[in-house]
Image (cartoon, rainbow, N blue to C red):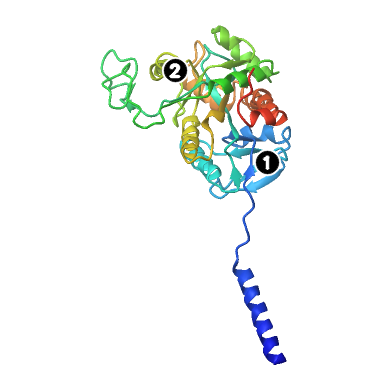
Amino acid sequence: MKKTILALLLAAAASLAQAQAQTPTPAPAPRPLKVLIIAMFEPEAAPWIAPMKLTEAIPVPGLLPESPALRCNSDDVCLLTAGMGHANVAASTMAVTLDPRFDLRQTYFLIAGIAGIDPARGTLGTAAWARYLVDVGIAHELDAREMPKGWASGYFGIMTKGPGEKPKFDYHTELAQLDEALLQKALALSRNAKLADSDAAKAYRKRYKQAAARKPPTVTQCDTLGGDTWWHGDKLGEHARAWTRLLTDGKGTYCTTQQEDNATYNALARAAAAGRVDLKRLAVLRTASNFDRPHSGQSAYASLMASTAGTPGGFVPATQNLVAAGGPLVTDIVAHWDQWRVGVPAP
């Protein structure tokens, strides 16, 4: 009898142990993030690390091999180095927003990267907050040597008959308008930011006749144009201005040129449609590392080569000014999270 009872107890214990072994360990609750800063490559990311104490690395499947982890701090601020160009930023952003370990429903997103700038709107080191994100790459193109006589550019809207005709937004990524309340708050918080400059930038900007180009860098609001082609020159610069006016019905002002922002926005929009993020919580800051066209007496090619070589002297100040202008927004969100958690605080 005793042996039978003992056998039954041992069998029950073994069965319980087997059941416990087969029961999956409950996953930890998703980590809420207050801010996710999105940089494109390491020189844009590096200036944030020390000031924000981003010492925690969280690997995320699907990120770039050279930047495989988010950098985070104890205040739930994280930094994503997403990669350059439309494809990289879209893939990296989606990888983070779909990771079940993060709760991004109340997260504020800050795209912070360098850019070229229209010398009529700013100078080397200028920090520009965007209202509109305009995609310049979704278009028809005719080589300028083959375009109809009288055309100012060989670029025109898809399924239109020529320049000046606004296309339908069939791709759904041609234009995005950011939240006005967040834009104005970001401007107010950064208005008096002390921006970095360099001796090389001071000397180079003197070669331009435009008043805005000759002044020291400031914080401003003007709009950004995205496309994977790194274009350059007066003619394409005029197209950038006209394209921005056309797609925004005259409300937007072309200012900075970069490669990624419409793609990042699209990835966040997909995540928003799945209930994982709030698109109203996206701000875009671009700082000028180079001019998008030559100064008087310089060819477009020479200007582009100077820009890629770093001759204008704006690269380092531009990366530093991402934190100088964007940091106050991040700091305020963390310091007053009880207010920011429910939405952008009133002025």
Q: Which disc number belongs to residue 20?
A: none
The image shows residue 234, relative to residue 79, as above or below, that is above
Residue 164 coordinates in the image, percent (x, y): 33, 16
Residue 22 coordinates in the image, percent (x, y): 59, 69
Residue 200 coordinates in the image, percent (x, y): 65, 19
Q: Circle 1 — which element?
A: strand
Q: Earlier in the sequence, mark 1 or mark 2?
A: 1
Residue under the image location 60 percent in, 28 percent down: 343
Q: Quadrant of the N terminus?
A: bottom right
Badge 1 amino acid:
Cys
Residue 95 seen by the camera:
yes
Badge 2 amino acid:
Gly
Query: In the image, 5: left or right of 289?
Result: right
Q: Which residue is mark 1?
A: 72
Q: Which residue is mark 2?
A: 237
Quadrant housing residue 214: top right
- Count neighbours of disc 1 (C-alpha within 10 A) and say few if under 14, some if 14 to 19, many if 20 or more: many
The image shows residue 4, relative to residue 69, as above or below, that is below
Q: CA distance from mark 1 to mark 2?
A: 38 Å
Query: In the image, 147: left or right of 336?
Result: left
Residue 288 seen by the camera:
no
Quadrant housing residue 75: top right
